[in-house]
């Protein structure tokens, strides 16, 4: 556990600085150049008014529906940054097949896959409705965000199996989830769009609970 504590502390220290940089870069990349500017023009309201109100939850119109109402640059940045963050979590979860041994790890993997893919589709729908690109620009591609794993981290994880995989997966996913929670809390504080803020609430609640579960797993592995 000492090595985990040292490694995690180092990841968080680096991630905090990287996140601040990412936020500044994203704000610079917005069309308006003002991080708190509202965007409630005709394009957003018109797109929202044409969305099918009674689409089934499993249909593409539901998963990719625009988030109606006013939005600001914090909402846009939240979606642009959380999409690649979620995508990496799914990549990590995908490595568990044939490698994870612990039943609780497998259970958490299934929960991550069940929750995060639909959330990615939702956020892509918001950005399309808002007339904003999926990428935050400046070549970020999700790199440098809080909790994001390096290519080497992913290779090291893929090389493990059984109990060793379970321990490394839990350690890395704790850091990854903590990064997502920090981003979601920023949206809670600075976002304007009610739908985006509701998703941020879900991220904080569910991923904080998963972090607690992963820490318990590490304690007994």
Image (tube, rainbow, N blue to C red):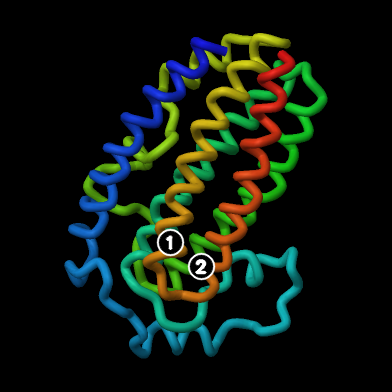
Residue 218 is situated, as x and y percent measured from the top left of the image, at 66, 20
Classify residue 142 by image quadrant.
Answer: top left
**Quarter of the image that includes the C terminus:** top right
Classify residue 191 by image quadrant.
Answer: bottom left
Is 18 on the left or on the right of 198, as rendered? left
Q: Is residue 217 above or below residue 36?
A: above
User: Could you say which disc has been placed on residue 215 in the image?
Assistant: none
Label 2's element?
A: helix
Circle 2 Cα neighbour tier, 10 Å, few/some/many (<14 / 14–19 / ≥20)? many
Residue at x 46% of width, y 75% of height: 193
Label 2 vs label 1: CA separation? 6 Å
**Quarter of the image that includes the N terminus:** top right
Residue 50 is situated, as x and y percent measured from the top left of the image, at 55, 87
Q: Are marks 2 and 1 in contact (CB under 8 Å)?
A: yes
Is 145 on the left or on the right of 160, as rendered? left
Circle 1 Cα neighbour tier, 10 Å, few/some/many (<14 / 14–19 / ≥20)? many
Is 68 on the left or on the right of 11, as rendered? right
Classify residue 70 by image quadrant.
Answer: bottom left
User: Could you say which disc has been placed on residue 187 in the image?
Assistant: 1
Residue at x 74% of width, y 16% of height: 220
Residue 146 is situated, as x and y percent measured from the top left of the image, at 39, 39
Residue at x 53% of width, y 89% of height: 49
Q: Nearer the viewer, residue 206 or 158?
A: 206
User: Could you say which disc has been placed on residue 197 in the image?
Assistant: 2
Which mark sits nearer the N-terminus, 2 or 1?
1
Residue 154 is situated, as x and y percent measured from the top left of the image, at 49, 21
Outermost residue to the right: 103
């Amino acid at each position: 556990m000492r090595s985990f504590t040292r490694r995690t502390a180092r990841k968080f220290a680096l991630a905090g600085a990287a996140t601040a940089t990412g936020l500044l870069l994203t704000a610079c990349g917005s069309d308006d150049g003002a991080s708190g500017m509202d965007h409630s023009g005709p394009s957003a309201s018109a797109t929202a008014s044409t969305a099918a109100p009674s689409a089934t939850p499993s249909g593409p119109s539901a998963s990719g529906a625009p988030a109606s109402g006013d939005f600001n640059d914090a909402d846009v940045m939240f979606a642009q940054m959380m999409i690649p963050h979620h995508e990496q979590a799914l990549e990590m979860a995908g490595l568990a097949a044939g490698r994870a041994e612990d039943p609780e790890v497998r259970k958490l993997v299934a929960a991550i896959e069940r929750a995060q893919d639909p959330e990615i589709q939702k956020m892509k729908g918001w950005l399309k409705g808002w007339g904003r690109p999926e990428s935050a620009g400046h070549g970020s591609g999700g790199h440098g965000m809080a909790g994001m794993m390096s290519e080497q981290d992913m290779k090291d994880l893929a090389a493990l199996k059984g109990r060793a995989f379970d321990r490394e997966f839990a350690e890395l996913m704790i850091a990854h989830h903590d990064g997502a929670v920090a981003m979601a809390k920023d949206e809670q504080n600075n976002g304007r769009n009610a739908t985006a803020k509701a998703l941020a609430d879900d991220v904080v609640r569910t991923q904080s609970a998963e972090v607690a579960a992963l820490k318990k797993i590490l304690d007994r592995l």
